[in-house]
Image (cartoon, rainbow, N blue to C red):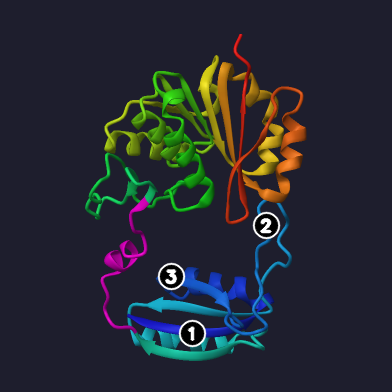
Amino acid sequence: MFELVLRAPQPLVEPVSDALMDELGALSVAVEDADAGSDAERALFGEPGMPAPAPGWDRSTLHALFEDEPAAARAAAWLLAQHGAQGLHVQALQHLPEQDWVRLTQSQFAPVAVTPGFWVVPSWHDVPAGADKVIRLDPGLAFGTGTHPTTHMCLRWIAAHADAVAGGRVLDYGCGSGILAIGAALHGAGETDAVDIDPAAVQSTRDNAAANGVTLHAALPDAASGAYALVLANILATPLKLLAPLLCSHVAPGGHLVLAGILVRQADELSAAYAPWLDLSVADSDDGWALMTAQRPAA
């Protein structure tokens, strides 16, 4: 395996990346900030729900992988010969030692403790001693592996309110990997609906539920119906505001609404958006993210 490392100004990043993948036979292309680690380093993406501060870094480093050295060398020569390639520089053409990429990727994902007895554990790890409830979950296309503060807070709430979860209908709206629905099922939830606008997430939830031996119904959002003892939604603040009337309509008398994907600074906005239906407040926070909950008065 050979790596071609290029330095490119922002306007060239996309056309060069496309040429590497579509015309020059690159196996993969990775792009990173050429100023990373220096005082000039800057974030490319804004906060969730906010526009990106810029379309790209001023200077980027492109790492393109090729099967062999001649292919990498041909690609470098072709790119440098193109009209309009001013500012493109070859930084390196180097052999990469063979690695077990699967093992290397797996090493980045360790078991996550929600509580001392409740863990999220990738399939290639042993279950930690003392774990009595375990979600077996591997990283995949759908969001939700238990490592992000928003997911972690939702699971922590479920574990702390097991009595409220047990036996009741549960709705996981925007289920992603299905981790929250699976967590609720492991804590004794009754009928559980997990819905998402992405069919890939729906299938991921079904697969993960089967792998964990739990029963739930995963489908597109129209499948959510009636009242639920617990409604979970870990999305982002803007869609959560738009979904306020819908989500609140699904909360049964005495039922709970648990929302995540909200920055602490957005909590007041969410409280105001939900005020016509439920009294939403911050129940937990972690690394700048807030967990907001409400309970509908019992009939």
- Residue beneath disc 1: 5
Location of the N terminus by quadrant is bottom left
Name the disc covering residue 28, or none.
Answer: 3
Nearer-the-camera pick, 19 or 163: 163
Answer above or below: position of 298 versus 93: above
Task: Tell me the residue at 39%/18% (across/down).
Answer: 167
Q: What is the span of residues highlighted in magenta in the rendered image?
A: 96-112
Answer above or below: position of 285 versus 292: below
Residue 210 occupies which quadrant of the picture? Answer: top left
Nearer-the-camera pick, 2 or 253: 253
Badge 1 or badge 3: first in the primary sequence: 1
Q: Is residue 70 left or right of residue 262?
A: left
Answer above or below: position of 1 versus 169: below
Mark 1 falls on what kind of element? strand
- Residue beneath disc 2: 47
Task: Tell me the residue at 46%/46% (across/down).
Answer: 144
